[in-house]
Amino acid sequence: MLKLIPLGGLGEIGLNMMAVEYGDTIFVIDAGLMFPEDYMLGVDYVIPDMDYLRQNRSRVSGVILTHAHEDHIGALPFLLRDINVPVFGTPFTLGVVRHKLEEHDLLASTAMHEVLPREHLKIGPFDIEFIRVNHSIVDGVGLAIRTPVGMVIHTGDFKMSHTTMDGMLTDVNRFAQCGEEGVLALLSDSTNVEKDGHTISSQEIGAELARITEAAKGRIIVALFASNIARIQQIVNIARTRGRKIIFNGRSIEVSVSIARKLGYLEIPESMEIDIDDLNSYLDDEIIMITTGSQGEPMSALSRMAAGTHKQIKIHPDDTVILSSKFIPGNEKAIGNIINNLYRQGADVVYEKISKIHVSGHAFREELRMMINLTKPRFSCPYTASTVTWCCTPAWRRTWAFPGET
Ligand SMILES: [Zn+2]
């Protein structure tokens, strides 16, 4: 009996974690957290219920990470603190994880193994193949898990974008080959199942960002997710064409940029990047700043700029602030406050609702359909962070079990 046991992430945003079990072997896919809702006073993080893994700790063989978003890796320190198992992931994912484990004082005690797309990993009766997927972070992978009862595909978070700055396209050939081989079950990202058609291309986003930059008279401040390396590269390229310098501001951006640069995933000419302390040596129209706080996080750089409490940056009336990310449900109020405060200080503010400056990292309906058609699974199970899944029934809370003969 093959068991797929979702420990979090179904019908909710965040907490992605799934145990895969056959005989005496269990491995875990992702270990994500969720940031607390407004009503969860005094709560810092919400993590999946890992009791099942604790009760079966001797059978847990490893954790495989699909990508480095917090809702897929954020709970890893809490798992490793209890159960010391090896961690497998792609170079950028492990780069982010290393930094996280260092903060939790777990780096020295954790075995980490780098994997690359199309490589295979053997864990007990499982053969796990990594397949490149495109997402709003570099180095994402899906998994083809060959088990004694058939192949299970776990897409990870993905979209089918064929134009991307990082060159990391979804490996449709490999997914199709898996389809030919025969797929028992497809566990697919379903976040954007409500959205018809395809995600817009990153070229369209680039064109819009370039248009805004060309029209801007003063500084441009772009707030985005620190891990969105492809978007950062896009902005760097625009800055280079317009002769603007780049400033990175915010701890998570600096960490993410440094990991991506080391791995060669981000190219920034040395002369283009300047230090925030040298800001005043340049004219306003010579600057693009990339910063954090696109979700209205109260202590973020953007939030402090909007409140007028940032040490080095005061908003100028000619500034253009671009929020190049999705408003995650639950954060709208905090983001709204920031937008209002920026307007009050005279800045022009551009965000998703009024301009095409963001594209989702999750497949829209036609892309989800394409994944199903490529892999031709016997069972299709939507698995990931979604406000509405394909089939909202309490059954999703149960274990999916596939007996050998079916
Ligand atoms: Zn993700």
Image: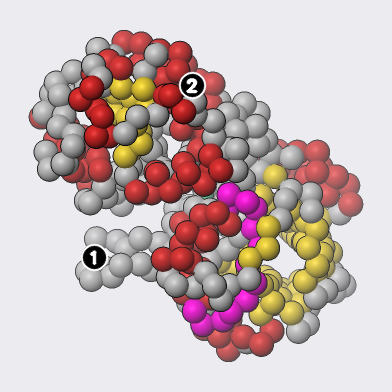
Q: Is residue 90 magenta?
A: yes
Give whichever of 354, 134 is nearer the camera.
Answer: 134
Image quarter where the C terminus lies is bottom right
Indicate whether 326 appears above or below 56.
above
Looking at the image, residue 36 sits to the left or right of residue 392; the answer is left
Image quarter where the N terminus lies is bottom right
Q: Is residue 286 magenta?
A: no
Residue at image point 18% right, 34% down: 313
Q: Position of residue 122 (x, y in %)?
A: 80, 67
Q: Amino acid at mark 2?
A: Asn
Q: Residues within 10 Å of mark 2 (few under 14, many from 20)?
A: some
Q: Position of residue 191 (x, y in %)?
A: 52, 48
Give whichever of 180, 272 is nearer the camera.
Answer: 272
Q: Secondary structure at mark 2?
A: helix
Residue 266 visible? yes
Q: Position of residue 190 (x, y in %)?
A: 57, 49
Residue at image point 23% right, 65% down: 39
**Residue under circle 2?**
237
Indicate whether 192 appears above or below 91.
above
- Dividing the picture into quadrants, the one containing residue 33 is bottom left
**Residue under circle 1?**
39
Indicate whether 142 appears above or below 126.
above
Residue 234 visible? no
Q: What's drawn in magenta, residue-wise? A: 81-93
